[in-house]
Image: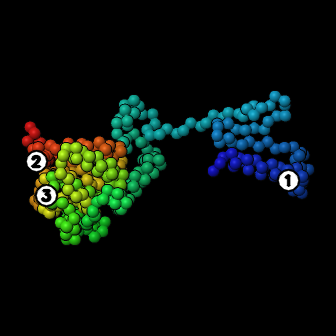
Amino acid sequence: MNPELVEQITKMVIEKLQTKTAAGNAPVEEVKKKTNIDTSEKVEVKFWNHRTNHVETECNQSPGCTDSAHEKEIPLEPKPPVGIENPFNKEELDLLMSKTPARIGVGRAGLRPKTETWLKFRFDHAAAVDAVYGDVDPKILESLSLLKVTTKVSDKEVYVRRPDFGRKLSDEAKQLIVQKCKKSPTVQIIVSDGLSSKAVEENLEDVYLSLNQSLQSLGLDVGTPFFIEKGRVAAMDDVGELLTPKVIVYLIGERPGLVSAESLSAYLCYEPRHGTIEADRMVISNIHKGGIPPVEAGAYIGTIVQKILKYQASGVSLVQKEQ
């Protein structure tokens, strides 16, 4: 809304009311007689200037009166302190708060959190819930030409309560992967919404394109990428059995926290099969604008894939062979 227009209309309304009062209606005349107040005298009205820290007052009719002469500056009330009031070591607290996005130094009101802190907590919690129960925009999958398959999960409630269902591909998904995807590639890229659809929407395009460019520059054979809806990390074992790739790169939305609901992770594994243990997988996590930049993460994943192929191992086994 235009503040100048609001101020102009307000002045016009008050001037009209003052003119009507001066013209003399019965109630005002009675008050005039009782109080001996001259209603023809113009009432001074002060307007708050929303564009500056000034109050406009009525200008005197003196020749030297200017627009700036009838503006009186008033001091603004100091804002209440944010966080802990009068901390024991303010410099140390400021240093700690600059090192982490965690909720430290937020202070309290009695035994309770401050209103601002509580509202921010509720907002972040709502964003986390939306990330878990939301769906990835189909346009993103179409723009990257990602085939979409499903797991044995029927809905989000089952996905949250039964992680084992998210680790197994549906029968329809297995048939579709065998029909549409390239067999025995060197690198197979998989994408899944996991526990954060928002992470995929915000980061996938940059990570995926950067990763593809990195793998192509290394001269590696890349399989047909696809998207697993409501998948878990171990779903890569089913894919390994079906397509027998050397390395699988699994980009998946991580469990949202109260600092970020947009964190993407990349899980990598050398020749995953049924029975692969978690120690054989490795992960690059915290991929988002507040963590590892998505474009940088894509390039870095490519270098890790190269190392996995060199040592023919991943996870703890890769660390042991590097030593």
**Can residue 315 be seen in the rendering of this structure?**
yes
Q: Mark 1 near mark 3, Cβ–Cβ under 8 Å?
A: no
Circle 1 SS class: helix
Q: Is residue 248 visible?
A: no
**CA gap, disc 3 and disc 2:** 17 Å
Quarter where residue 157 is shown: bottom left
Nearer to me, 170 or 255: 170
Q: Is residue 128 left or right of residue 277?
A: right
Kindly identify which numbered label has been placed on residue 313. 2
Say which amino acid is labelled 3.
Ser
Q: Residue at x 30, y 59 (%)?
A: 145
Residue 111 higher or lower than 236, as above or below:
above
Residue at position x 90%, y 52% in the image:
23
- Label 3 crowd bin: few (<14), some (14–19), many (20+), radius 10 Å: some
User: Which of 49 and 311 lies nearest the eye of the viewer?
Assistant: 311
The residue lying at 63 percent from left, 50 percent from top is 1
Q: Which residue is mark 1?
A: 20
Circle 3/circle 2 CB separation < 8 Å: no
- In the rendered structure, the answer to whether residue 24 lies left or right of residue 139 reads right
User: Of callouts 1 and 2, which one flags the residue occurring earlier in the amino acid sequence?
Assistant: 1
| Most foreground residue, 298 or 178 | 178
Determine whether, in the image, residue 85 is placed left or right of residue 183. Answer: right
Q: Which residue is mark 3?
A: 184
Residue 203 x/y as whole percent: 33, 50
Please tell me which residue is depicted at 71% across the width and 33% down the height of the picture. 72
Q: Residue furthest right?
A: 33
Q: Is 265 on the left or on the right of 13, as rendered?
A: left
